[in-house]
Image: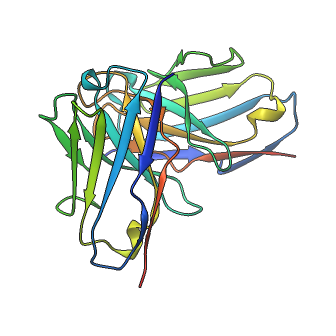
């Protein structure tokens, strides 16, 4: 079974900074079937990225996904105040599975 | 507007049963696979179960296999999760989630607000 490891656990940054979040899989993710979700306190998760690099409808272009095989990255080019949240990766190439999450907090 | 309204959560004793429902609107429910994902208090997301658009294929996480049953009624635009032999570790907010396609194995694009299940004596 694939294991997804997200790093770092917490990222402390300031508005305007660039955020780089990592998601590493223990085995290659089939067809790069990897998604990223954003979750704010008290809210349901929201889809940001699917198929490793495709932005979901309505997602600002400051969010981008990259990677393939076992290493994937979510990049937020310039953090806006509303971007401080927890981010989860999820693979759907085999049994669906989420990573443990990365919290992006205000420094 | 695409909307998923989860309901049926509550307080239940260990060993008890509960049925969650998810009412869908704003899209053609019968052509999309659906899922349940849960989140224990202060923890991350855990995939629970999924069902294909016509109900012919289902999938369960090992942690709930044999205790939970997912089903759907396409005539009522409703997804269900029958939970039995509940344990304290099943305590969580349960989200109903829509898939992007009809079969299991693609990404999830719309989430309900969740319904809380508390297993405690």
Q: Position of residue B107 (x, y in %)?
A: 39, 28
Picture residue at 38% right of the left edge, 66% below the top? B90
Q: How is the image coloured?
A: rainbow
Of residue B108 and residue A71, the one placed in the foreground of this image is B108
Q: Position of residue A101 (x, y in %)?
A: 57, 47
Picture residue at 21% right of the left edge, 32% below the top? B52
In the picture, measured across the screen, residue B65 lies left or right of residue A85, that is left
Total label count? 0
Of residue B6 and residue A93, the one placed in the foreground of this image is B6
In the picture, measured across the screen, residue A82 lies left or right of residue A53, that is right
Of residue A13 and residue B9, the one placed in the foreground of this image is B9
The relative height of residue B57 versus residue B82 in the rendered view (above or below) is: above
Picture residue at 65% right of the left edge, 51% below the top? A9
Of residue A8 and residue B44, the one placed in the foreground of this image is B44
Q: Is residue A91 visible?
A: yes
Q: Position of residue B85 (x, y in %)?
A: 24, 72
Residue at the limit of the structure toward the bottom, as seen here? B121
Q: Is residue B61 visible?
A: no
Picture residue at 38% right of the left edge, 26% below the top? A33
Residue at the limit of the structure toward the front, as seen here? B76
Q: Position of residue A83 (x, y in %)?
A: 74, 34
In the picture, measured across the screen, residue A50 lies left or right of residue A43, that is left
């Amino acid at each position: 079974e694939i294991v997804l490891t997200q790093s770092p656990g917490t990222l402390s940054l300031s508005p305007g900074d660039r955020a780089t979040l990592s998601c590493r899989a223990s085995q290659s993710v089939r067809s790069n079937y990897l998604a990223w979700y954003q979750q704010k306190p008290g809210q349901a998760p929201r889809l940001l990225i699917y198929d490793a690099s495709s932005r979901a409808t309505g997602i600002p272009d400051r969010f981008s996904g990259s990677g393939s095989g076992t290493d994937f990255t979510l990049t937020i080019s310039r953090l806006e105040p509303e971007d401080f949240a927890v981010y989860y990766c999820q693979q759907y190439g085999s049994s669906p599975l989420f990573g443990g999450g990365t919290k992006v907090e205000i420094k | 507007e695409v909307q998923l309204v989860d309901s049926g959560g509550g307080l239940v004793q260990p060993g008890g049963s509960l049925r969650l429902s998810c009412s869908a609107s704003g899209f053609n429910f019968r052509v999309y696979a659906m899922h349940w994902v849960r989140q224990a208090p202060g923890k991350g997301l855990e995939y629970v179960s999924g069902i294909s658009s016509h109900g012919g294929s289902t999938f369960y996480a090992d942690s709930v296999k044999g205790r939970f049953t997912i089903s759907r009624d396409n005539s009522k635009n409703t997804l269900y999760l029958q939970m039995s032999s509940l344990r304290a570790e099943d305590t969580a907010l349960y989200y109903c989630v829509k898939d992007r396609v009809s079969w299991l194995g693609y990404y999830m694009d719309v989430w309900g607000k969740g319904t809380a299940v508390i297993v405690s004596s």
